[in-house]
Image (cartoon, rainbow, N blue to C red):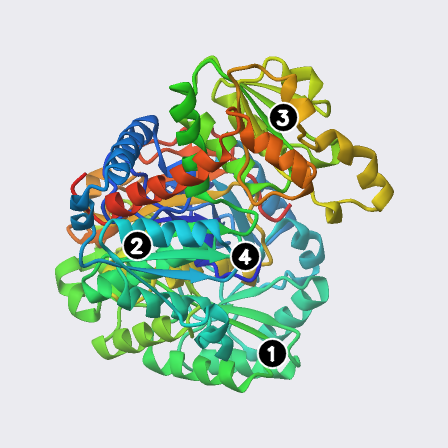
Amino acid sequence: MILNIPGMIDPHVHLRDLDWAHKATFASETAAALAGGYWAIFDMPNTPPNTTTRAALDLKLARMAESAVCDYGIYFGADQGGNQYEYSAAAPDVVGMKMYCNATTGTLLIEYRQERTDHAFQWVAATGKPVAVHAEGRTVEEILDIMKMMHGRLRVHFCHISTRAEIAMLREAKRAGGYGGISIGVCPHHLYLTQDDVPRLGAYGLMKPELKTSADVEALWDAVIDGTVDVIESDHAPHTRAEKESDRPPFGVPGLETTLPLMGLAVHDHRITPERLVALLATNAQRIFDLTPPRDTVTVVDLNESYTIEDAKLLTAPGWSPFAGMKVWGKVREVRIRGQVAYDGERVIVPAGFGENVAR
Amino acid sequence: MINSLPLTATIYQPHAIDGDFVGKHIVTVEQFSRADLTTLFAWVSDLRTRVHAHDRSLLDLCAGKVMATLFYESSTRTDMSFQAAMLRLGGEVIATSGGVQFSSVYKGENLADTLRAVGCYADALVLRHPEVRSSYEAAYQLDLLGEKLGTRPVVISGGDGVGEHPTQALLDLYTIFDFKGSADGLNITLVGDLVNGRTVHSLAKLLALHGATGTRLNFVAPPALRMPASILNLVQAHGIATYETDALEDVLGDTDVLYWTRIQQERFASRAAYDAIADHFIMTPDVLQRAKPDMILMHPLPRKHEMGTPADHALLDADPRSVYFHQMHNGMMVRMAVLAATLGARL
């Protein structure tokens, strides 16, 4: 079956560049996004210099404007040093705010409930845009408490949910209502890999949140199928092979070019319908972030075409994937943005700087 | 997003025919290349000869196959010509007793479930539905159903709202080929409500995709009912010259194919506004007098006042240049070819 997917969005990527340009650049990773079928990708704020000040945001916007080949959104970051006064000036140019509530790559971490509440209040005072939250385990419950306290005025996108307990909590909260906007993102690596794969993958199987048990994987699939999960997001986080093979390998794996065909595999296996795939990769994120794709912005994908993921064929700068060797379904034939063919199934054919900020 | 149809109707892309009709849904003229049309039209001509000769081997072509009709809007020609086509190919035809309004649609069943029910029984489903792209939804649902059941039911659009009516466009183009040999080098004039008319949209599109060379398309419509820019652009992009006017006289004398359609009074703000233009869009024997002796007059039918009085109808019908009954007859032949080809008959 050939689908024309309107405006695919990955709302959770780490494109690097800036001080981490040795890992990857906006140019290389937005090209990878097009190859993966995406119209737009939303960059997280924890690449140094952290996107937590207007000056840092301007730097990222300028670099992005000259190099992106697909459209993009940017998250502003909550800083434990206190940057709430920056929110109203930043809000018009970003898709949302990111609050790290558990430790991960980078230096951002809002540890205390008091602080989390204050950041949330200040953000809502500045804008109605959502807050993307990195919350694991009990922290999910705490965020839900804060949402309840804010009487539904806070919209939270729960990033990379990975356990049975977390998904159960969120499913119940969605059912009960009264929290405001709850949306849930799940990553393909948490759907297709378990902790049992780590010995095989080594450092290439390390990311935050880490891989879980097969029971967790099963619970996540149930939630993908029943509609509890809103978005499949890659948490694309490239690191060089040298870094991954060092004594202290960093966390994170690339995923922009593998998410669509991995969900195509789920369609092929009759786990989800093509319609659900489109909701998970495009229309739900459009709804959550209040975005309408520009006219004639479409990904043409042939779900009947299968291929094997190969490191050498990836456009992402480090050139590796934890899914290498897997047979997947769904070949991207074309990505059109604003009526222009940006990717023709083989090559990116728009110039650097073609991409636009979706927030403007 | 379009109407109240689900997302699937907008995301589904039908397969191009690309030389192989078997198992393909027929939902838009965009599926046909020039080569596909040449193949199809050769089959149509062959089938017509065999029908006229009462060739009983036609009955083997779809023997044992079942076609279901699902019509959410009234239709005489499309419905009956599809039924006749299937019967002449030796297939069987089913429909809900008493029409769709007495089916489970009446109980509030959604379109997807009704489509899948029919897909469980029939090899081919002919769908007419008032919503644009409803046939895409049908194609999507039947693909998934077929995968589940290990079958390959096809949907053939019988018209979706103001969207497309692909077999009508095919029969129109076939009729032009039939009388003129090809669509190349012709002056083809489309007259009437060009903004709302789905037959003229589909025909213009098909002519463009077919790649007619040296052809000019004249669009004759009141200013408020002009051909949409999207179709004008498509036609021009395929190298077909276009000319727009609200006066038939500008182009009548050069016209090889005159395709007449009705202008509906309800498209106008007032009776006065309608009356002001209506007279210019009525085909009468007098008008036909001024046309070329070897031109043809086409009409998708049904017709009302746009062909004048009943007396005018009689005079027009008697003119050998009026080919709208041939058009209808060809309609059945085209639908035979489409059914036989998509159901895998050996043609």
CB within 8 Å, label 2 to label 4: no
- Outermost residue toward the left in this view: A200
Label 2 marks which chain's residue?
Answer: A
Other residues around mark 3 within 10 Å, as few (<14) / some (14–19) / many (≥20): many
CB within 8 Å, label 4 to label 3: no
Other residues around mark 4 within 10 Å, as few (<14) / some (14–19) / many (≥20): some
Residue A349's place in the image compared with B94, above or below, is above
- Give amino acid for label 3: Phe
Determine which residue is flagged by label 2. Answer: A253
Residue A270's place in the image compared with A292, above or below, is below
Q: Position of residue A250 (x, y in %)?
A: 30, 56
Label 4 marks which chain's residue?
Answer: B
**Who's the residue at 84% across and 46% down the image?**
B270
User: N-terminal of the two: label 2 or label 1?
Assistant: 1
Q: Is residue B256 shown left or right of residue A241? A: right
Determine which residue is flagged by label 4. Answer: B130
Residue A266 visible, this angle: no
Determine which residue is flagged by label 3. Answer: B219
Determine which residue is flagged by label 1. Answer: A114
**Who's the residue at 46% across and 79% down the image?**
A139
- Give amino acid for label 2: Val
Residue A99 visible, this angle: yes
